Image (cartoon, helix red, strand yellow):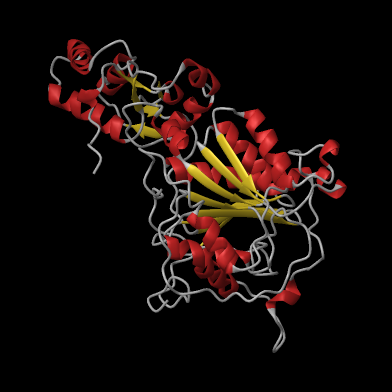
Amino acid sequence: MAEAVTVEAFGRPRIKPEHRAYRTVDGNVRVGSVIHGIGAEIADPQGWVWTLVEAMDGSRGPSEVVAEVLRTHPDLPGEDARQAMADLLAAGFVDDARASVPVPPREEDRYSRGVPLLRWMDLAPRTSPWDAQLRLRKARVLLIGVGGTGGHAAQALVASGVGHVHCVDPDVVELSNLNRQPLYRESDLGRPKVEAAVATLRALNSDVTVTGERREVARPEDLAELVAGPRQAGRPPGGPPPVRAAGRDAEHRTSDGRPGHADPPSGTADGPGRAVSSSMPAPALPPSRYDLLVLAADRPDAIRRWTNRVCLAAGLPWVDAGYRGPLVTAGVYVPGQGACWECLRDGEIARRDLRLGPGQDPEVASPRMPWNPASAVTAGLSGALLAHAALALLTGVPAMEPGFRFGVNLMLPGDPVHQRTPRHPDCPACGERA
């Protein structure tokens, strides 16, 4: 178990620069910025809380901060000031101005804009703002599909410093891909996507290991083999344990957020889906050599169901994303924590009122085409949501309760998508009798 972080371990405790405090008109102290989900307001009738946060400017040690508060408020018990510092730390508002930078200067410069964002969103007490970036540095990700969604996600993961990204895709670059897949150029036409993607991604960040294989996922066993990882490539010494999300409960959402098809939106592989059996072998799989599976493929039609079953068997967290017309969504799943993909899908079907006639399949309520209408905008949004979900699970920043789906509807920008359902005890994939 990780050792608890205490304010006494900090050389120079300070309110995070991104969480700078201010006083309200009625004398309360607001800290953590005005962003919903981060900020907090503290009643301060005697004014000593404001003195405390001002003293926590990174120039003093913990005892010196307390002494500064008591100098202005001599009747205040010193223990109250220390407890207030501890409370601010526990709420995620404090870091150590004297913390060392545990990476080479090249990486310090490269990630000098991303680490402050992680610090801004991180509400867990940390000894160093680089903790989350170090988790990314050690992480191993399996990315299936490097089309529109997957290509955008791959660039974000590699640029963010994920230590090893392994890309899988069976296709070649076609002219019709280029309206939404900026990972490729006209000069790549006819070239295997994986080959072109790996070359571009390596050029983006040479500090990251990027590998790939041209392979089609045609059956569940293909996924199981990919999840197991290359037989010759074990986890590097000191690599991270299997990732676990910060939350504990959730649900799943389906394709369109409105009456329609119940499967999640298509991803980036725009070819026609194939009707393939969704049966899966029941035995548990060995632990994966990856920390996370990122699914950005939409074919065969059953690939999300297969992925759900394989990841449950291997105990591997996974994320997926895609688009159906103007609706763009991503899903977050961790085995044993919240609803699995099938729980969430079934919950969404039950929630809807499609007003179907007797015997009609829910499929009829949603359009099905041989290719998925998409643009650089929908592909880019889905890839960004997918990368955000992946980075959040790998770092714990921001904390997410897995088993849900979130996204945006471009037809109604003020109507965000967020779907969650309880885990179903009778779910055929993760339930008690699975």
Q: Nearer the viewer, residue 2 or 251?
A: 2
Instruction: Give how far across and how far down residue 142 sits, in percent.
Output: 55, 49
Q: Residue at x 71, y 84 (%)?
A: 360
In the image, is 144 to the left or to the right of 434? right
Q: Is residue 286 above or below residue 262?
A: above
Instruction: Give how far across and how far down residue 367 sits, in percent.
Output: 78, 68
Instruction: Give how far across and how far down residue 310 sits, in percent.
Output: 50, 64
In the image, is 431 to the left or to the right of 5? right
Q: Is residue 289 above or below residue 27?
A: below
Instruction: Give how far across and how far down residue 222 sits, in percent.
Output: 59, 63
Q: Could you tell me which quadrant the N terminus lies in?
A: top left
Q: Residue at x 46, y 54 (%)?
A: 317
Residue 197 falls in image quadrant: top right
Q: Nearer the viewer, residue 213 or 355?
A: 213
In the image, is 415 to the left or to the right of 179? left
Q: Residue at x 84, y 48 (%)?
A: 174
- Residue furthest to the front: 232
Total marks in image: 0
Q: Could you tell me which quadrant the C terminus lies in?
A: bottom left
Residue 177 visible in image: yes
Residue 330 visible in image: no
Q: Nearer the viewer, residue 257 or 68?
A: 257
